[in-house]
Image (cartoon, grey):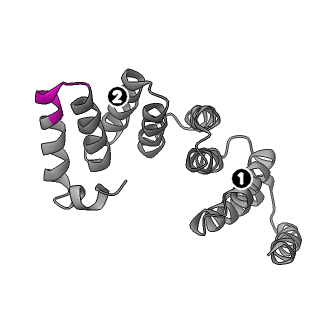
Amino acid sequence: MVLWLLGRRRSANSELESYKDKRSASNHFAREGEDFMATRNLEAAIQCFDRAIQLDPSNEYAWGGKALALDYMKKYENALECYNKALECNHDNAITWHNRGLTLTSLKMLRESIESFEKALEINPNYAKAWYDKGRLLEKLGERESSQQCLSKARKLDPMIFVKLRGR
């Protein structure tokens, strides 16, 4: 596995010579990180995202990918820092706001989590997962009426959402 990774890394470095600028090279490493995320090789993914960030500190996808990997590793404080960096790069990314909300929930920062879900919904009012997660969190907080409104909205936008998200 290590030899495969090193071989892949060498070929990636030689490929980088064909990129005309650091942003393109950064995007290359971010895509490599996404590939590693797909196989749940989180350490390798983080290495790729770090390289992407080193080449282009404004690469919001690299920051978001690193945050997600850290979240999967239950390194929530570090993940939150990366989500905040991603939002500095692009304040209008509903997915990043939503994922940040999930991390805040893991940190038991529930009101801040709701604020992140609300920001995601300001950006994309049709984001069913954000409605669902906001509704579930409001339910935990005992705000039943608001919770039901959010969950109804989620189901209206995606009738299968409860089936899709049941296992998480």
The answer to whether residue 35 is above or below residue 138 is below
Disc marking residue 88: none
Other residues around mark 1 within 10 Å, as few (<14) / some (14–19) / many (≥20): many
Q: Position of residue 115 (x, y in %)?
A: 37, 25
Other residues around mark 2 within 10 Å, as few (<14) / some (14–19) / many (≥20): many
Viewer-side residue, 104 vs 31: 104
Q: Is residue 46 left or right of residue 51?
A: left
Residue that appears at 44% across and 27% down: 108
Q: Quadrant of residue 20?
A: bottom right
Q: Which residue is mark 2?
A: 114
Q: Which residue is mark 1?
A: 46
The residues colored magenta run 141-147
For the residues labelled 2 and 1, the Cα–Cα distance comes to: 27 Å
Name the secondary structure under disc 2: helix
Residue that appears at 57% across and 33% down: 80
Residue that appears at 12% across and 44% down: 152
Residue that appears at 73% across and 41% down: 57
Name the secondary structure under disc 1: helix
The answer to whether residue 82 is above or below residue 28 is above
2 or 1: tag closer to the N-terminus = 1
Q: Position of residue 90 (x, y in %)?
A: 54, 38
The answer to whether residue 115 is above or below residue 28 is above
Say whether residue 146 is magenta.
yes
Task: Give the quadrant of the N terminus.
Answer: bottom right
Q: Position of residue 122 (x, y in %)?
A: 32, 33
Q: Is residue 9 left or right of residue 125?
A: right
Q: Is residue 13 left or right of residue 128?
A: right
Q: Position of residue 50 (x, y in %)?
A: 76, 49
Residue type at mark 2: give it. Answer: Ile
Say whether residue 9 is magenta.
no
Residue type at mark 1: give it. Answer: Ile
Q: Quadrant of residue 145?
A: top left
